[in-house]
Image (cartoon, helix red, strand yellow):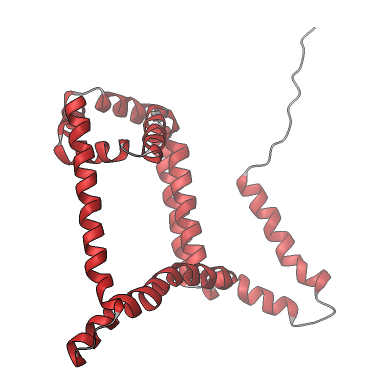
């Protein structure tokens, strides 16, 4: 007796989009409070000709992400990427990057701090776990990040979060400039150059410069001691 396997219906993305479209179109009929213009207003905004320009940008990002994911999912493309990563050209590029003095200086600077060591470990773990087979998923992730950035920047629903982000982004710089730099650094120098007035704030600039020089000399001496020990 042959056993028949049960198949279950799994609707795809297109099916869910069609179902969602029907629900959106029929929503004003049930929630319009007998308003005859509700359906017309909704269909006016539902028409793509009346959409803002950044809608098209998001659709192009979605199309690009889908296209790149489909291309990277191809077995021949993945084989070509494996061949490129195993080639002598890629090995020479990695060796030149490792031996470059700016890269070595950045790595030494990062290793001086505990947070830098943790960040470097995470970075190495990320590249070790980055496989060619996961590239389609990365393409989708980058596409959705780009869509979210455009949506956050231009959507009217995101006006309040944008204002909060702009406020907390500008406030520290404005506080440092208007509450620290102007009254304690710029103001005393301007008064001294204009009227020759000498106040205790005038000595903050040379004191800060002296402390900065001492701090830099201390960092340089520590780096020399570590080089001698290693």
Please identify the residue farthest to the bottom as the structure is shown.
195
Task: Count every numbered label the image shows and give the total.
Answer: 0
Q: Nearer the viewer, residue 101 or 109?
A: 109
Q: Residue at x 84, y 78 (%)?
A: 33
Q: Quadrant of residue 93?
A: top left
- Return the x and y of residue 63 as percentages of the image width and height: 45, 52
Please identify the residue farthest to the top as the structure is shown.
1
Q: Nearer the viewer, residue 189 or 94?
A: 189
- Return the x and y of residue 170 as percentages of the image width and height: 43, 71
Q: Quadrant of residue 79?
A: top left
Compared with residue 125, is residue 162 higher up or lower down, i.e. above or below? below
- Residue 64 vs residue 28: left or right? left
- Return the x and y of residue 134 as percentages of the image width and height: 44, 32
Compared with residue 128, is residue 62 higher up or lower down, i.e. above or below? below
Q: Is residue 103 visible?
A: no
Q: Residue at x 47, y 60 (%)?
A: 149
Q: Is residue 175 visible?
A: yes
Compared with residue 82, is residue 135 higher up or lower down, i.e. above or below? below
Which of the image's four quarters has the N terminus?
top right
Which of the image's four quarters has the C terminus?
top left
- Return the x and y of residue 81 as percentages of the image width and height: 30, 29
Q: Residue at x 49, y 51 (%)?
A: 144
Q: Nearer the viewer, residue 19 or 133?
A: 133
- Residue 31 vs residue 134: left or right? right
Q: Nearer the viewer, residue 150 or 186?
A: 186
Q: Residue at x 21, y 24 (%)?
A: 87
């Amino acid at each position: 007796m042959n056993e028949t396997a049960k198949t279950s219906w799994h609707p795809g993305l297109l099916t869910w989009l069609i179902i969602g479209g029907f629900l959106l179109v029929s929503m004003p009929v049930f929630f319009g409070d007998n308003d005859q213009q509700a359906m017309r207003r909704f269909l006016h905004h539902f028409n793509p000709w009346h959409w803002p320009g950044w809608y098209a940008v998001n659709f192009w990002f979605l199309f690009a992400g889908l296209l790149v994911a489909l291309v990277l999912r191809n077995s021949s493309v993945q084989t070509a990427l494996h061949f490129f990563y195993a080639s002598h050209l890629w090995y020479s590029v990695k060796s030149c990057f490792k031996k470059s003095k700016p890269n070595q200086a950045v790595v030494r600077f990062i290793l001086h701090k505990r947070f830098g060591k943790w960040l470097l470990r995470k970075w190495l773990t990320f590249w070790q776990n980055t496989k060619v087979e996961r590239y389609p998923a990365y393409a989708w992730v980058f596409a959705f990040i780009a869509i979210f950035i455009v949506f956050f920047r231009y959507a009217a629903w995101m006006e309040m979060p944008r204002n909060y982000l702009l406020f907390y982004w500008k406030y520290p710089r404005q506080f440092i400039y208007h509450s620290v730099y102007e009254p304690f650094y710029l103001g005393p120098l301007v008064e001294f150059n204009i009227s020759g007035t000498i106040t205790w704030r005038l000595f903050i600039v040379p004191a800060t410069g002296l402390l900065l020089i001492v701090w830099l000399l201390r960092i340089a001496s520590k780096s020399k001691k570590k080089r001698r020990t290693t």
